[in-house]
């Protein structure tokens, strides 16, 4: 295996030196839309060096359309009524990567600047992390992604109508040494690519399902962790398609297999050098008061913020009992049937796993909700309920812990949430909720196979 180390850029000056030291005519730029999809373009050398210093303009349609490039008709910030002007954009030097698929072409993430920053997904997370810093905390995080791989192409899946797709391997075979050894070149290319692109994987294995893998991205400061998650989702797909395969991160593509999780691990440490804010020697499960209140806030606000975590219509097909996805706002210690899993350990490893998150979530938006709700819990000293031991799926219904059942309901809960508006700002809440309403409306325009099979002849 290769052991190439990623480049490390920490400033505009270093980014400029990187470009000027290489004989390259172009640089690639990218940033996420509301759904977390990486959008971008190539710019020539001179344009990039100018943008690095002064910023540049990019059509604000990137926050005004959905994943299918259809224009929202219900948002205020942009639309035909504003004529889709350019929004100011900033290059983020410290996100520099070299793309192994493109002869080490430099790639940089970007973010929207004011006034568009108010609805920029990366800007949202930065505001939440600034809130944490003002409270005396630094957040660390790590994303785990499950994704299915198919022996298909973008053309073949459409020609087949997304039916009878061929997975790269058949049947159930979690943690398979056989599968990973037979497909060793594929695994090694993914590991090598992620190492070189500074999103190193600390664990990679087969999961339960035909052709499904799980990749655990190594922990980092929260903003960098979200950057890595965004890049991983895109470039895992790139690598697959270059091999004649396809990867999907949708929450649930088949009712034959469990859904695809995007679990998020999070912890806090003190900015004054005092170490972990979550760990307390001698406390039950080593949980400090800060950790307990952080957990309480996550649990309390989960029903209100679920639309930021479960962000597509398909997300709610995953949240059913017995398929490794939690269905209520519960917590437990080392309990994988609950929405929040406390993982006790050393000061360096004490953390919470936000298990309700799926692979389809926008990493910036999801992590903002995960951390923001915890900070709200600390501010308001929210105590969690009694922890769940055993199977959380067997609990009787509890309205206080119940979660929205549809994306539309989740959007209404976000709009009505005073905590969301305090944490994320009115502009983001209104814009984001409207985009989720749009997503549900688009779904309602279509007739499903289930409806045809159930009603066409008999009803």
Image (tube, rainbow, N blue to C red):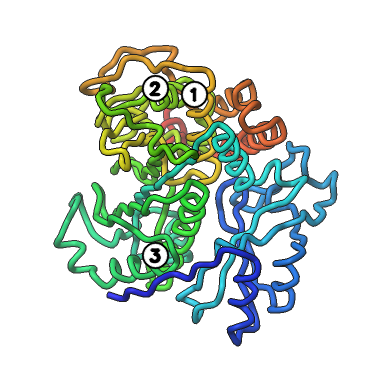
Q: Work out whether mark 3 precedes mark 2 in sequence or the reverse, and give the earlier one.
A: 3
Q: Are marks 2 and 1 in contact (CB under 8 Å)?
A: no
Q: Is residue 364 left or right of residue 140?
A: right
Indicate the quadrant containing the N terminus: top left, top right, bottom left or bottom right: bottom left
The residues bearing labels 3 and 2 have C-alpha atoms spaced at a distance of: 36 Å
Which residue corresponds to the image point at 27% horizontal and 33% vertical from the top-left?
344
Look at the numbered disc 1 and give the secondary structure of its residue.
helix
- Relative image position of residue 325 (x, y in whole percent): 33, 34
The residues bearing labels 2 and 1 have C-alpha atoms spaced at a distance of: 9 Å
Q: Reply above or below: 227 against 254.
A: below
- Relative image position of residue 84 (x, y in whole percent): 80, 52
Residue 55 lies in quadrant: bottom right
Q: Is residue 382 left or right of residue 212?
A: right
Looking at the image, which residue sits at the far left?
Answer: 178
Q: Which residue is mark 1?
A: 378
Which residue corresponds to the image point at 79% horizontal and 56% vertical from the top-left?
86
The residues bearing labels 3 and 1 have C-alpha atoms spaced at a distance of: 35 Å
Q: Is residue 328 visible?
A: no
Residue 444 lies in quadrant: top right
Q: Which residue is mark 2?
A: 289
């Amino acid at each position: 295996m290769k052991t190439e180390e990623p480049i490390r850029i920490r400033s505009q000056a270093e980014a400029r030196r990187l470009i000027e030291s290489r004989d390259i005519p172009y640089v690639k730029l990218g940033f996420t839309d509301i759904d977390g999809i990486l959008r971008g373009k190539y710019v020539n050398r001179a344009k990039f060096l100018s943008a690095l210093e002064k910023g540049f303009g990019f059509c604000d349609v990137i926050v005004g359309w959905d994943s299918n490039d259809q224009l929202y008709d219900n948002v205020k910030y942009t639309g035909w009524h504003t004529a889709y002007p350019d929004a100011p954009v900033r290059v983020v030097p410290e996100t520099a990567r070299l793309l192994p698929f493109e002869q080490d072409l430099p790639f940089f993430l970007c973010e929207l600047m004011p006034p568009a920053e108010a609805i920029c997904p990366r800007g949202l997370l930065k505001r939440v992390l600034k809130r944490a810093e003002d409270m005396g905390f630094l957040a660390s995080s790590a994303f785990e992604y499950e994704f299915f791989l198919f022996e298909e192409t973008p053309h073949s899946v459409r020609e087949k109508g997304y039916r009878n797709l061929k997975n790269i391997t058949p049947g159930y075979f979690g943690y398979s040494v056989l599968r990973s050894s037979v497909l060793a070149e594929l695994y090694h290319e993914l590991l090598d690519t992620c190492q070189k692109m500074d999103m190193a994987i600390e664990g990679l294995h087969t999961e339960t399902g035909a052709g499904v893998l799980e990749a655990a991205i190594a922990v980092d400061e929260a903003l960098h962790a979200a950057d890595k998650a965004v890049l991983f989702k895109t470039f895992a797909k790139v690598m697959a398609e270059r091999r004649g395969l396809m990867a999907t991160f949708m929450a649930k593509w088949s009712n034959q297999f469990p859904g695809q999780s995007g679990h998020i691990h999070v912890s806090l440490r003190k900015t004054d050098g005092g170490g972990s804010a979550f760990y307390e020697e001698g406390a039950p499960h080593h949980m400090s008061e800060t950790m307990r209140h952080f957990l309480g806030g996550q649990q309390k606000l989960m029903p209100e913020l679920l639309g930021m975590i479960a962000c597509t219509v398909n997300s709610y097909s995953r949240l059913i009992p017995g398929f490794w996805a939690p269905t209520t706002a519960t917590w437990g210690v080392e309990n994988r049937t609950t929405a929040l899993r406390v993982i006790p350990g050393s000061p360096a490893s004490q953390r919470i796993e936000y298990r309700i998150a799926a692979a389809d979530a926008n990493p910036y938006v999801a992590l903002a909700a995960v951390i923001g709700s915890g900070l709200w819990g600390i501010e308001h000293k929210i105590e969690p309920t009694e922890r769940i031991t055993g199977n959380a799926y067997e609990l009787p219904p509890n309205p206080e812990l119940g979660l929205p059942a549809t994306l539309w309901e989740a959007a209404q809960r976000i709009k009505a949430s005073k905590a969301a508006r305090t944490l994320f700002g009115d502009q983001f809440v209104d814009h984001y909720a409207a985009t989720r309403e749009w997503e549900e409306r688009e779904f309602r325009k279509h007739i499903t196979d289930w409806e045809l099979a159930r009603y066409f002849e008999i009803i």
